[in-house]
Amino acid sequence: MEETISNIPEDKVFDLVVVGGGAAGLMAAGTAARDGRSVLLIEKMEKTARKVNITGKGRCNLTNMCPPEEFLGKVRANADFFAHSFKTFTPNATCHFFKKQGVKLEEEAGRRIFPKGGKAYEISDALRWWCSDHGVVVMLNTKVEQILTAAGRTYGVMYTNKRGFRRKAEGRAVLISTGGASYPATGSTGDGYRLASEVGHTIVPVRPSLVALRSDHPKMKDLIGLRLKNIRASLSVDGEEAASEFGEIEFSTRGIDGPVILRMSRAAVDAVIDEKKVEVALDLKPALNEDTLRARIARELEELDPQAFAIELLRKMLPRNLVYFVADSAGVHPKTYAAKLSGEDIGRLIAAMKRVVFPIVDYGPWEQAIVTAGGVSTDEVDPETLQSRVIKGLYFAGEVLDLDADTGGYNLQIAFSTGRLAAQMK
């Protein structure tokens, strides 16, 4: 599928050298080659697009069809910078591109787009074939060590090949699309930050984003395996609400996880790093206010056997894993007769269902983070071309930039849009 080589003729000068063969790098390499340019793509792993293959739990949520304003609102950093790339290559364009490559797509809840076959490799294979069809030359198991520059312009890269020898690859332009630091096993180990920094670029401090949050709540272990739908979660930092989301969460060995938590994790991670007090509060019955919930409890009590315990009341209202958890939080003994629950007892049960607080003390490691927050400062990159303002002929695309967004197909679209624009080499 990929035309791979181990060494380059000394007199060969490529129009574009792409460093990193992920979603952004493959899109850029294929685009430039399609436009008639000679392209060398260098990937340090044994195969390109490894991270693409694990996105969306192996199904690859490649974009999102929400309105443009809503989409840009999901970009958590430098949305204005990304706007030009987005306009150049939209979600509609992404869908058209992959359909043209023979990938059937389907839209799911939340306007998310997936390959109809449900396999991420359909997307990565389509990108590889496209690059191959247009003559992109690929070097695998090859690590770029340095961006070569002279008089404020790049002229190629130094790399170490799979046999451990250092060599030079010359190019009229170089694109850094090495990804971030999340999922390092796929090859994203932050190499691009070092390469950019060495030629004078500022790196906004990187940290995990779209990552599970860890709590020291004493009952956390009792909740592992629990998945909750249609709940409201609120994030507070030093007592002030910082975010509120509605949807699904889950408890796992990683911590508190799921779409709602992932969307709030960027703000939570930043606050934890700054050593602020961070809490996540869950409303287990967001559709019911306290009065409505009290009336619901009264109806359930009427239907219960007079000898039923409080725990049986809670079983009618909550998932199994939460029954003892809520009773304990409310200070109600589970073996109390339900008929003997006082108004104060019921008030405490309602309070426990409407606000369960988890102190957040840490977050998941890079190995579990879906994307990276931070990266190459967009202040030093031209948004209309993605060319460096520091080094002429040097371009950036994808997660290596200080761009990140919510879960839901937004981050892959950032990769495709920026890769497409950078490849125009304006």
Image (spheres, rainbow, N blue to C red):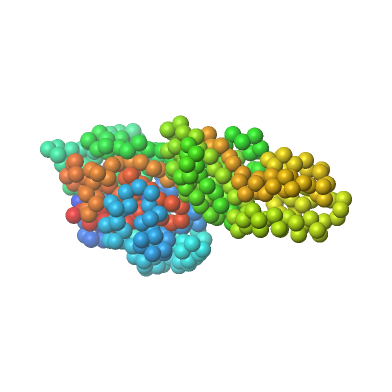
**298 in relation to 281, above or below:** below
For the point 74% across and 45% down, the residue is 345
Classify residue 253 by image quadrant: top right
Classify residue 222 by image quadrant: top right
For the point 50% across and 44% down, the residue is 235
Q: Give the total of numbered labels.
A: 0
Farthest right residue? 307
Q: Quadrant of the N terminus?
A: bottom left
- Give the percent coordinates (x, y) of residue 202: 27, 37
Farthest top residue? 275
Closer to us: 395 or 287: 287
Farthest front residue? 343
Q: Is residue 278 left or right of residue 327?
A: left
- Give the percent coordinates (x, y) of residue 41: 30, 48
**182 in relation to 301, above or below:** above
Closer to us: 308 or 116: 308
Say whether residue 174 is visible. Answer: no
- Give the percent coordinates (x, y) of residue 270: 42, 38
For the point 59% across and 34% down, the residue is 216
